[in-house]
Every structure is written in C-alpha cells, then in structure tokens.
Image (cartoon, helix red, strand yellow):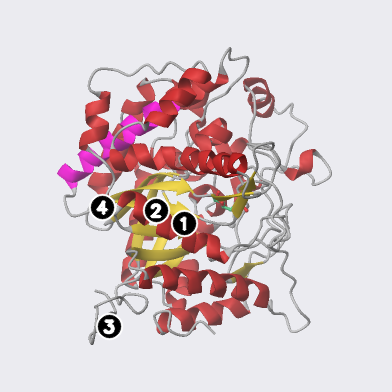
Amino acid sequence: MTNSCNSCCGAPKGFPSDFLWGGATAANQLEGAWDQDGKGPSVFDFVPFIEKEDQQGFKLETSREEIEEILQGKSKYTNFPKRRGIDHYNRFKEDIALFAEMGFKVYRLSISWPRIFPNGDEAEPNEAGLKFYDELFNECLKYNIEPLVTLSHYEMPLNLVLKYNGWADRRVIDFFLNYTRTVFKRYKRQVKYWLNFNEINVMAMAPFIGGGVLLDGAKNPEQLKYQALHHQFVASALAKKQLTKISPDAKIGCMLARSTTYPETCNPADVRAAQWANDFNYFFSDVQVRGKYPSFIKRFFEEKGVKLEIQRGDLEILRQYPVDFVSFSYYMSLVQSAESINSGSLGNFGFGLPNPYLESSDWGWQIDPIGLRIALNDFYDRYQIPLFIVENGLGAHDTVGEDGKVHDDYRINYLRQHLEQVKEAIIDGVPVMGYTMWGPIDLIAASTSEMSKRYGFIYVDQDDYGQGSLERSRKDSFWWYKKVIASNGEDLS
Ligand code: BG6
C-alpha cells in the first residue's frame, strides 16, 4: 500500500505503509560454528585474515595449492575469522530479539549451503542443518519478521571447488537444484522472499568467492568465469521454476552489487567509458530480468575470446523464468575515464578513480547518497519491476566510550542521508519493497575478514583475532533506527 497524495495526482509522498525495514547478514560472516552439527567447509572458511601491511589486508582469490596447504596444516595463515563469525549459530535467539526490539519487519540472511549439503554433491541433506534454519525462521516469525533468504552468499561447499572447480562444471547446476528443492520444500511455510546469488556480478572480479572457480593456469580465465556464470544463470532460472511449483506465492529476486559510475569529465570519451562500466554492471541483471543476454555483452565475449557452451533449452529457460524483483547492494559510486577504464581501486569489487566531490569511509569507499537515488531511478527505468535495497551501510572503526557505549553519529549520518534519497526515489514513483541495512550486528567483513570493520547497530565485543566476550550492546544508531522504523521513515532526524 502506498502512502500517496489523495488530493491531486496520487503520487507517493513517502515510504509505503508495507515497506520492509530491516537488516541483512550472511551465514559465513556471522554464524561461526563452521564445523558444528555436520556442516561442511565453504569457500569463505578458507579465506584467511591478512594483516593490513601485507597485501593491503585483502585476499579473495586463492589457488588449489594454497587450499591444500591449509587443509594439511602447512599454511602460513592461521587466522580464519569467518570460521568463528560472531557465534550467531549459538546466539541467534538473542540477536533476533535485538532486531525485533528495533522493530524489524524483515531480516535478510543466507542459508549456508554446506550446512545443508556438507559436500554439495550428496543426495541427502544434513537434518541438523535444516533444523537450525527451521528454528531461526520460527524465531523471526515469532516477532513478525519476514525472512528474506539468500540461497548462495559466497558459501559454496569446498568439496565442489576441489572436485568440480565450482560453477565452471555444469554438473553443479544439478547439485544446486537439489539444494534449492530441499530448502524450498522445507521452508515453504516460513519463507516468502528469496534471493538467488548474492552479488552475482562478483564472478567477474572474484570467481573463487562468487562461484568456487579456481583460475589456476587457465588458458583463458575469462572463458572459465563466464561459462561458470552461464551455469549460475541457468540454475537461477531453474530454481525459479521449482519455486513456482513448490511455493507459488513466494517471490525470488536477483542480487547485484550496483556501482553507479560517473564520467570523470564531460569529454564524450569519458562519458562513453562510464556508460560501458554501467552497462557492464547491468549485464548480469539484464539476463536475470529480461531473460536474455544483451547484445553489447556478445561483442565483449567475442573480443575476450569467450565462447559460451550453451545447451539446447538454456536460452528458453532464461526467457521463461526471469526474477520477480531486483535486489542490490549499494555502498558507493565510482568514477571512470577513457584512460582509466577498469583500473584504479576503490571499494569492494569495483574499480574507479577518486571523486573530488565525495568523502570516503575509513576504508576509502566513497560515500554518495545521491548515487543511491540514481541507482534506484535507473534500475526502474531499465526494468520496470519492484526493487529491494538489500545492502547499504557504513563500515567504520567504532570505539567504545568511557561510558561503555558506542556513539556512532557518523553511521547515523550515512544512513540518514541514504534513506533521504530512497524517499526521493519513492516519490518519483520507484516501487521500493524494502531496505535491509548491512549488517545490523557487527560481523566479519567479507573483503578483508576484519572484525574491526564494523557496520552494526549492535556492537559485538570481539577483535580481529577472536579475542573478546562476544557480548552484544546497543550503539546510538540502534535507537535511531528503531525510531526510523517506528515512524515508517517519516522521522529520519
Ligand atoms: C557486499 C557483500 O559486497 O559487501 C557482503 O555482499 C559484504 O557480504 C558487504 O559484507 C560489505 O563488504 P565488507 O568487505 O566491508 O564486509
């Protein structure tokens, strides 16, 4: 239902009354319990913490050799923070009670695929894993919080990497569909909103994380990446087909890391460079929404020597089962010039130049609330289907004050300014289903595996090395978000 102007044009005036306010997390970043109750290892359990001075604190790609070394205990890396998360697995009731206290209407989380199928390729699921999510969803529903569930958020079973090279192998489609059929059936009464692949465009930048693909010695890495991506596209469409049969009222969306990209100058060559960056970013959702590969990407494939193996029926499946809505993460905007196309480094998975008009976060991510409005308006112009902002937030160094509290006015400012822009887009007529802030409780950073990169409304007492009581406490932003939700976004002050 829309909060609209009755007296004149019927234009929306603000957030609709059924707007889904909440927060977003991923299993691999908060559950911990990486080998508890039969869970198998996932790709992210093998991404270590790296000290800042070493490799800029960043390690998303790996090799078979490095994984083998870790498995045999011969690796120089010993700190794997995603394995411990914030022990949400054993404390989820306390965490969800805190989300409920803020008034959450929705909670976005992911199911850890290897908790359900520890190896990924076995026929029967792990009942203990299924039971965990049963309890988790019931706990949400107890507080009238809708679960919004990501099927795959950088949590591919490691066995599928070692045995099949992840999504590069077409057989993984069937393993995935066994998993999706299992969870769709099991949770059809609890879950109405699903997402297929978190930030599906990550395959282009970090194929190990996005698809369990090791590039080790590949003759043409691009071929491997886009073939794996094709398999994910087909799997997403087939999963939608399953869902329409198993749970006809449920909705499933795609999920894109959106990088609004600006030209460095009004030089047409720079404008064209930015246009390409935006088109390339949209290519992934183009396939999942429009059900076909856009023509510009075919040219790109040709130039990169990519020849997709497309089986009979694949294109028809893509066409027949597009997603119901588009969801996306938005943290920052990027800048491109004709000279710099796809170089420079700023942000999580994007490339870009510094923007002199914007401030940056402690991690150099450029803060651009208007970029979110541009993203919303552009998405809707392009697809004309509902949108869901499923990640947006500020990773910062928080300090606990002498009063024992975190006073995070910087986080409140970031979120306020972004929500003001969401409201503007809604008034423009863009149908936004909801907003799930990333991550409502401090958790392990995806990119750097740091605990000290904090996003939460809720502080968790733990450091980068796993030291701390794990005690949860409310930051100032907790009370602010509670007020925002209670006023349905009318009071952003
Ligand atoms: C998105 C991911 O790219 O960015 C999340 O979907 C991630 O998993 C978020 O946590 C923020 O990135 P980071 O590296 O600061 O955790």
Percent from the top left, x then y, of residue 15? Answer: 36, 75
In the depicted structure, whether residue 216 falls above or below residue 149: above
**Left or right relative to 447: residue 328:** left
Q: Residue furthest right?
A: 53
- The residue tagged 3 is 5
Mark 2 Cα shell of 10 Å, populated few (<14), some (14-19), many (≥20): many
Residue 405 in sight from this viewpoint: yes
Respond yes or no on whether mark 2 lies under 8 Å from ligand 1.
Answer: no
Q: Position of residue 413 (x, y in %)?
A: 61, 75
Q: Is residue 334 left or right of residue 127?
A: right
Residue 353 position, x and y percent, is: 69, 47
Q: Position of residue 464 (x, y in %)?
A: 73, 54
Q: Could you tell which of marks 3 and 1 lies nearer the N-terminus?
A: 3
Q: Earlier in the sequence, mark 4 or mark 2?
A: 4
Q: Nearer the viewer, residue 183 or 268?
A: 268
Q: Answer above or below: position of 292 versus 184.
A: above
Q: Which residues are magenta?
A: 228-246
Reading the image, the residue beneath label 2 is: 379
Rounded to the nearest angstrom, the CA distance separating label 1 from label 4 is: 22 Å
Q: Nearer the viewer, mark 4 or mark 2?
A: 2
Q: Quadrant of residue 396?
A: bottom right
Q: Name the residue furthest top.
A: 219
The CA distance from mark 2 to mark 3 is 24 Å
Q: Secondary structure at mark 4?
A: strand
In the rendered structure, find residue 251 and report the number of the disc placed on it. Answer: 4
Identity of the residue drawn at 47% across and 18% down = 302
Residue at image x 24%, y 78%?
10
Badge 4 crowding class, 10 Å Cα cut-off, few under 14, some 14 to 19, many 20 or more, is some
Labels 1, 4: front one? 1
